[in-house]
Amino acid sequence: MSLTDNHRGAVYMTGSMAGFAVEDVFVKAAARGLPLGQVLLTIGLLGMVTFAAMAARRGEALLPPAFRSRPMLIRCGFEITGRLFYGLAITLTALSTTSAILQATPLVVVAGAALVFGEKVSPQRWLAVLAGFAGVLVILRPGSDFSSLSLLAVVGLLGFAGRDLATRAAPHGLSNRQLGALGFAMLATAGAILLAVSGGARMPTGLGLAHLAGGTVFGMAGYHALTHAMRTGEVSAVTPFRYTRLVFALVLAMALFGERPDLATWIGAGLVVGSGLFALTRR
């Protein structure tokens, strides 16, 4: 049986989510021995240089005029916000909790597309968006068990949602390599901002270098697969496979960091994923 574009897009998306989940593990591990800002800056620079070299080899402009367009500048601002606060979240809070909250990003994109671009959203999809937000509240547990650090993940998801919305208005014609170089440049920028505030950069150990290399390799693989996924299949068919990231993240968090998500996290994650799948498969 031959694979359709949607099948290939789903495979790319699933592979992308696996890559990002493993990247999170390396970032969290590297940040145990190095300042987070240094970790993000190093991975960002390594990824940016590699993607830029790939683009140059294909004869593609390293600073195309499209990069200076208003939508791309807005996109960059949101991506820096998402990268910075999500990096803080996976370092300071449980990886399983942060990953579960991040799954609400597509729901915010659905709501934002209606409010910003005037896209029609049915009442059923609005109910799904509200159910997803309720799931995030269940995970956050406002009250006696509430941790303000969990809000870092919420700000991170808002940054990523804004980036995705801005991408819709961005100029076409940019290659995966150019987009990859720009994405990792924003990661480096986020790291530089954090390092300038916190300071404390130091020489990594051999294990630290291995963590940085692993984060770079899997982050690049995830980013490359993501752009392929979004350009191969239909968005409505491919996007639901973003939720596989939660499966990978939960398995890795439990296996490598000994995390044991509580009942509230499982219930909240179920609400977020279930409502997201409903919203993305309905008109």
Image (cartoon, rainbow, N blue to C red):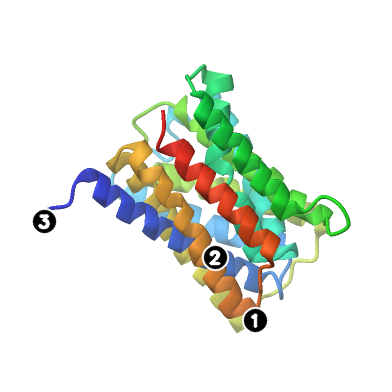
Disc 2 marks which amino acid?
Answer: Ala
Residue linked to disc 1 = 205
Disc 3 marks which amino acid?
Answer: Met
The answer for how far apart the CA atoms under marks 1 and 3 are is 49 Å
* Callout in the foreground (3, 2): 3
Q: Residues within 10 Å of mark 2 (few under 14, many from 20)?
A: many
**Residue 146 in sight from this viewpoint:** yes
Q: Position of residue 80 (x, y in %)?
A: 63, 43
Classify mark 1: helix, strand or loop. loop
Seen from the viewer's position, the closer of residues 208 and 19 is 19
Classify mark 2: helix, strand or loop. helix
On screen, residue 165 versus residue 171, left or right, reads: right
Q: Are marks 3 and 2 in contact (CB under 8 Å)?
A: no
Outermost residue, top side: 118
Residue linked to disc 3 = 1
On screen, residue 271 versus residue 172, left or right, reads: right
Q: Which mark is residue 249?
A: 2
* Residue located 60% across and 72% down the image: 253
Q: Are marks 1 and 3 in contact (CB under 8 Å)?
A: no
**Residue 175 in sight from this viewpoint:** no
Q: Earlier in the sequence, mark 1 or mark 3?
A: 3
Outermost residue, bottom side: 206
Q: Earlier in the sequence, mark 2 or mark 1?
A: 1
Q: Position of residue 19 (x, y in %)?
A: 45, 62
Q: Position of residue 202 (x, y in %)?
A: 73, 71
Q: Residues within 10 Å of mark 1 (few under 14, many from 20)?
A: few
Disc 1 marks which amino acid?
Answer: Thr
Seen from the viewer's position, the closer of residues 198 and 107 is 107
Kindly indicate the quadrant of the structure image that contains residue 63. top left
